Image: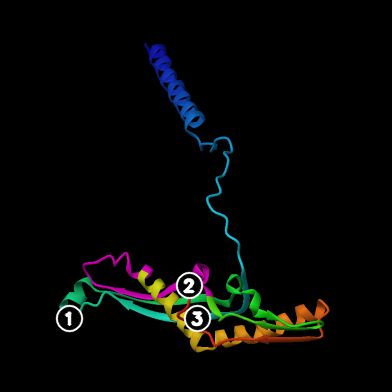
């Protein structure tokens, strides 16, 4: 009798061990596999004719809230402070230039540049964070509030760059760069004329 009980217990233990081994073998960390490399389809190729001549890095603090007041704000309000870091690049779209924008003879050349533009405004997500946030008692927060704050930060950073004179900086740097380039190509007299920029131009 005792022998049969011992055999049953041993059988149960062996069965449990086998189950654990099989589970470990079959259910361990999976090895991820990927299908054969498939051809990439290039949808569009564009000729980039941009001359980037100025770049500003700007930090901006944005306060955003759901706009509730009184008791409603206490229960459902959401407010945050976003510290955003962004980069604004200005320069020129050289594809708009025409043959008449180049004039001169011999070792002299006159170049007339188009209006400087804001070429890009980018928020650096790695350096942008929510500094502080307060929420009402009955809310987990507005899911769209932070994304709206980031969009507002991008607009504010672009405006700050404009007010800081990024387009004037783009003109000045373009004159210096083009003078160096054309003089290194053999021209003795290089004149570069610029135009006042408009931050509203894209």
Q: CA distance from mark 3 to mark 2?
A: 9 Å
Is label 2 in a helix, a strand or a loop?
A: loop
- Point out residue 65 in the picture as x, y percentages from the top left corner: 30, 76
Query: SS class of the residue under badge 1?
Result: helix
Q: Nearer the viewer, mark 1 or mark 2?
A: 2
Q: Quadrant of residue 149?
A: bottom left
Residue position for label 1: 70
Residue at image coords 47%, 23%: 18
Q: Residues within 10 Å of mark 3 (few under 14, many from 20)?
A: some
Label count reads: 3
Q: In the rendered view, does 183 fall on the left or right side of 13? A: right
Secondary structure category for the residue under label 3:
strand
Mark 3 highlights which residue?
Answer: 59
Verify CB contact (< 8 Å) between mark 1 and mark 3: no
User: Magenta segment, which residues?
Assistant: 119-147
Kindly identify which numbered label has been placed on residue 128: 2
| Percent coordinates x, y for residue 35 in the rendering | 55, 35
């Amino acid at each position: 009798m005792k022998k049969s009980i011992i055999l049953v217990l041993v059988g149960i233990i062996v069965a449990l061990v086998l189950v654990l081994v099989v589970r470990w073998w079959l259910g361990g960390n999976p090895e991820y596999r990927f299908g054969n490399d498939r051809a990439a389809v290039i949808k569009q190729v564009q000729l980039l004719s941009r001359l980037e001549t100025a770049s500003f890095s700007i930090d901006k603090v944005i306060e955003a809230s759901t706009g509730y007041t009184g008791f409603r704000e206490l229960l459902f309000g959401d407010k945050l402070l976003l510290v955003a870091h962004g980069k604004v690049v200005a320069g020129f779209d050289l594809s708009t230039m025409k043959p008449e924008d180049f004039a001169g003879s011999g070792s002299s050349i006159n170049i007339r540049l188009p209006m400087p533009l804001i070429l890009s405004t980018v928020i650096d997500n790695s350096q942008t964070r929510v500094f502080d946030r307060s929420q009402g008692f009955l809310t987990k927060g507005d899911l769209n509030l932070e994304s709206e704050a980031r969009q507002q930060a991008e607009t504010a950073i672009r405006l700050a760059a404009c007010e800081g004179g990024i387009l004037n900086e783009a003109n000045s740097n373009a004159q210096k760069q083009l003078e160096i380039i054309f003089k290194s190509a053999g021209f003795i007299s290089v004149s570069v004329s610029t135009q006042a920029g408009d931050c509203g131009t894209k």
